[in-house]
Amino acid sequence: MHIIIGENRLELTIGDITKEETEAIVNAANGSLMGGGGVDGAIHQAAGPELLQACRKIRKEQLKGEPLGTGEAVITAGYNLPASYVIHTVGPIWNAHHPNQDKQLASCYRQALKLAKELDLSSIAFPSISTGVYRFPIKTAAEIAIRAITNYLQTATFGQVKMVLFSEADFRVYQSALKNITDSL
Ligand code: ADP
């Protein structure tokens, strides 16, 4: 399913993000940028070892040895992936008493879109950030993700944004969030 916002298109699909042919795909990384499980592991596996080398360089040079902060984003090439670029962002680890986590999750989507736009890219694919190992409740995460993306697309000419969901069940949750939010646009 898809919606049009100004000159932009937001699409929801089910699939494996490592196969996406958008110019950039987004990685739900951890602050170390050294790879991990879930979508992070799949992206590193498909991109090949040069991706890890590029992440090491960013840690050392751009981040001065510090981890990438939650809600922030950096960009590397895509190496063996069909996508030319990978935008790495760190979602919040869900915690029932953490007041900032909704803002941090929204920031992941916004920062990734801003970075892509700065590089003049016009297509990007996101996974469902924080809803795997980081345990963010998917219904809330989907509302935050769709709202962050639609808010951005209402203010910018970007192009194509895809949410690539890994299961039919996740797709349905995002579909319902998209319906609720577009009804109120
Ligand atoms: P996080 O640590 O941010 O929770 P995970 O990788 O554990 O990240 O999970 C984020 C989401 O990515 C989950 O919904 C998971 O099912 C999904 N996922 C895992 N592998 C892929 C893939 N190859 N393509 C798209 N989504 C994926």
Image: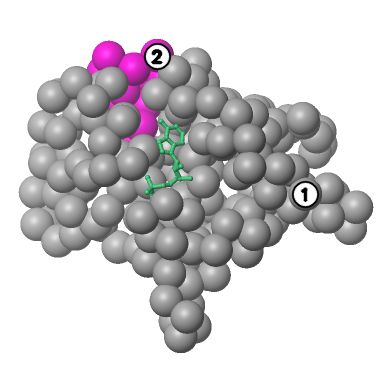
Q: Name the residue at 14% across, 49% down.
A: 59
5 relative to 46, above or below: below
The residue beneath circle 1 is: 176
Instruction: Describe the element under mark 2 as helix, strand or loop.
Output: loop
Q: Are marks 1 and 2 in contact (CB under 8 Å)?
A: no
Left/right placement of residue 137 relative to residue 91 reads right
Q: Name the residue at 20% across, 29% down.
A: 51
Residue 154: give x, y in percent of width and height. Answer: 75, 47
Quarter occupied by the N terminus: top right
Which mark's residue is nearer the viewer, 1 or 2? 1
Q: Name the residue at 15% across, 24% down.
A: 50
Q: Is residue 80 magenta?
A: yes
> How many marks overall?
2
Q: Would you call the spot at circle 2 few (<14 residues within 10 Å), some (14-19), or many (20 or more)?
A: some
Residue 82 is marked as 2
Quarter occupied by the C terminus: bottom right
Can residue 169 be seen from the camera position used here? yes
Disc 2 marks a residue whose amino acid type is Pro
Residue 70 is marked as none
* Span of residues in magenta: 74-86
Q: Name the residue at 36% across, 32% down.
A: 86
Q: Where does ligand 1 appear, by image quarter?
A: top left
Q: Is mark 1 within 8 Å of ligand 1?
A: no
Q: Is mark 2 within 8 Å of ligand 1?
A: no
Left/right placement of residue 179 relative to residue 113 reads right
Instruction: Describe the element under mark 1 as helix, strand or loop.
Output: helix
Left/right placement of residue 57 relative to residue 71 reads left
Of pointers 1 and 2, the one earlier in the residue sequence: 2
Residue 24 vs residue 39, the one in the foreground: 39
Disc 1 marks a residue whose amino acid type is Ser
